[in-house]
């Protein structure tokens, strides 16, 4: 069976975009199953740069089908804007290439307003992306969400808006009119996603499930309350798409060779010194969606070991190893005592690894660093990224599906 899920094992921004793009070439269908337009990735295909936050990465490849599963929260205006942008760059998008599950909850203007106004209350700040993600998931769980399929029936939509208006303050008629204006554009993509994906699975198609954010932002297993509002772990690929969990056997855990985080909340190995600054500068650690600086720190092995366990990671894709090239000493957190990290020191390799494509060409000390990560996380490394470009990659496995 070919199904594969790609998740981040840290706090997001591990470099999922590059790996998803690499693997998408061998996939037939690419599925987003959680999150919304809080995610962000940049794809470079034949000299064209695509900046996506909601559409699955496969959308830029004409021969792939992209799917937005029910686990996503969907801002319909953002969807149309992104479709238009991709089309303006010469990629055709039509309902044979893009499908949206009909039970996908919508992000509406009052969700974004609520998210942003909550963030202004400084003592309760989570550092969200301000896109309305949390309030939209709250409404889903609170049974007052508007689902994309509700746009099909005016009376049903009015009824659902009236229920939402008991909780949120907005002009029902105005929002109804705004939605009426765009509904045909959106509805053309709405389809029976679970049936489609299960049929394709049975036919042996390769489906790539593209996670957003990272495991430490999972609403159940992350650093609560400093988390996003969805489940970001691999198990969500099943719930968020309708493909049973036993039909998604492969899990690639995207893992940065050090640690970063955006937003508030604990980060055990965070560095406040020149090494942290060095990682931020060399790694160009700025958020794709919000442009915020990312906090940087050493590799946290207990944390990655735990998220590999939670996700059932079958192989680690180790990203940005080249960012460590100039460091004379590299530390790995091997344990945490009362919140204080215990470090092991390894000698740096102090030579460039940029663009290396063969494992045997890596400096011995870099190989030792990678081996140590494998030992400490109890997980095999199956891909090593040595630069931002697609071909700056060491593949340690023939096939990922
Ligand atoms: P929200 O998802 O906008 O509600 O933000 C909640 C937390 O998740 C904040 O700490 C955000 O910075 C973080 N977050 C959300 N999306 C991403 C992402 O794509 N990468 C990294 N962090 C993210």
Image: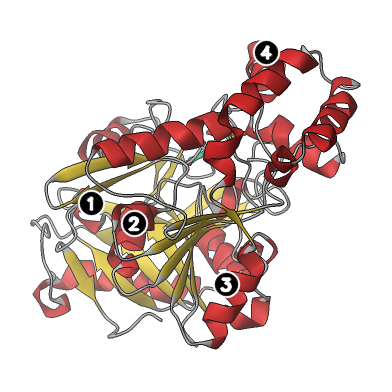
Check disc 4 and report the residue beneath it: 117
Q: Earlier in the sequence, mark 1 or mark 3?
A: 3
Task: Specify whether tag 1 is near ligand 1 (CB below 8 Å).
Answer: no
Q: Earlier in the sequence, mark 3 or mark 4?
A: 4
What is the C-alpha distance between the residues marked 1 and 2?
8 Å
Q: Is residue 155 placed above or below 149 in the rendered structure?
A: above
Task: Specify whether tag 4 is near ligand 1 (CB below 8 Å).
Answer: no
User: Is disc 1 in contact with disc 2, using a CB cutoff of under 8 Å?
Assistant: yes
Q: Where residue 81 appears, x then y in whole percent? A: 42, 31
**Residue drawn at point x = 36 percent, y = 65 percent:** 64
Instruction: Examine the rendering and report whether any part of residue 358 can be seen.
Output: yes
Q: For numbered disc 4, what is the local secondary structure?
A: helix
What is the C-alpha distance between the residues marked 1 and 3?
40 Å
User: Is disc 2 in contact with disc 3, using a CB cutoff of under 8 Å?
Assistant: no
Check disc 1 and report the residue beneath it: 324
In which of the image's four quarters is ligand 1 placed?
top right
User: Is disc 2 in contact with disc 4, using a CB cutoff of under 8 Å?
Assistant: no
Q: Is residue 135 placed above or below 368 in the rendered structure?
A: above
Q: For numbered disc 3, what is the local secondary structure?
A: helix
Q: Is residue 316 placed above or below 349 in the rendered structure?
A: below
Check disc 3 and report the residue beneath it: 197
Q: Is residue 60 placed above or below 315 in the rendered structure?
A: above
Check disc 2 and report the residue beneath it: 257
**Residue drawn at point x = 11 percent, y = 47 percent:** 47
Instruction: Examine the rendering and report whether any part of residue 262 can be seen.
Output: no
Q: Nearer the viewer, residue 359 or 130?
A: 130
Q: Earlier in the sequence, mark 4 or mark 1?
A: 4
Q: Where residue 358 appears, x then y in whole percent? A: 13, 76
Q: Earlier in the sequence, mark 2 or mark 3?
A: 3
């Amino acid at each position: 069976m070919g199904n594969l899920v790609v998740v981040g094992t840290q706090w997001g921004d591990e470099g999922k975009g590059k790996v998803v793009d690499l693997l998408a070439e061998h996939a037939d269908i690419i599925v987003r199953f959680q999150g919304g337009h809080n995610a962000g990735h940049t794809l470079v295909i034949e000299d064209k740069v695509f900046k996506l936050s909601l559409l699955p990465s496969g959308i830029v490849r004409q021969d792939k089908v992209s799917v937005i599963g029910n686990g996503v929260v969907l801002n319909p205006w953002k969807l149309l804007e992104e479709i238009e942008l991709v089309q303006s760059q010469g990629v055709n998008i039509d309902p044979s290439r893009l499908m949206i599950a009909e039970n996908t909850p919508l992000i509406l203007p009052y969700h974004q307003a609520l998210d942003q106004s909550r963030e202004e209350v400084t003592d309760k700040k989570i550092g969200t992306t301000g896109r309305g993600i949390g309030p939209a998931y709250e409404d889903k769980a609170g049974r007052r969400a508007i689902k994309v399929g509700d746009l099909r029936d005016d009376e049903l939509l009015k009824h659902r808006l009236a229920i939402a208006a008991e909780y949120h303050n907005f002009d029902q008629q105005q929002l109804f009119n705004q939605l009426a204006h765009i509904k045909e554009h959106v509805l053309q993509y709405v389809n029976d996603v679970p049936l489609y994906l299960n049929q394709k699975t049975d036919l042996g198609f390769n489906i790539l499930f593209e996670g957003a954010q990272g495991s430490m932002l999972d609403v159940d297993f992350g650093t609560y309350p400093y988390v996003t509002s969805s489940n970001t772990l691999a198990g969500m690929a099943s719930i968020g798409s309708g493909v049973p969990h036993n039909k998604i056997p492969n899990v690639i855990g995207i893992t940065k060779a050090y640690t970063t985080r955006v937003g508030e909340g604990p980060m055990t190995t965070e560095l406040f010194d020149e090494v942290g600054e060095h990682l931020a500068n060399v790694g160009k650690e700025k958020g794709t969606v919000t442009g915020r600086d990312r906090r940087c720190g050493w590799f946290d092995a207990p944390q990655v070991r735990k998220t590999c366990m939670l996700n059932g990671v079958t192989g680690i894709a180790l990203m940005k190893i080249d960012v460590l090239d100039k460091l004379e000493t590299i530390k790995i957190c091997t344990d945490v005592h009362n919140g204080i990290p215990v470090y092991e020191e390894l000698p740096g390799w102090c030579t460039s690894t940029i663009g290396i494509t063969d494992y045997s060409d890596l400096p011995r000390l870099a190989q030792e660093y990678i081996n140590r990560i494998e030992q400490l996380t109890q997980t095999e490394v199956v891909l090593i990224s040595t630069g931002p470009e697609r071909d700056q990659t060491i593949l340690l496995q023939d096939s990922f599906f």
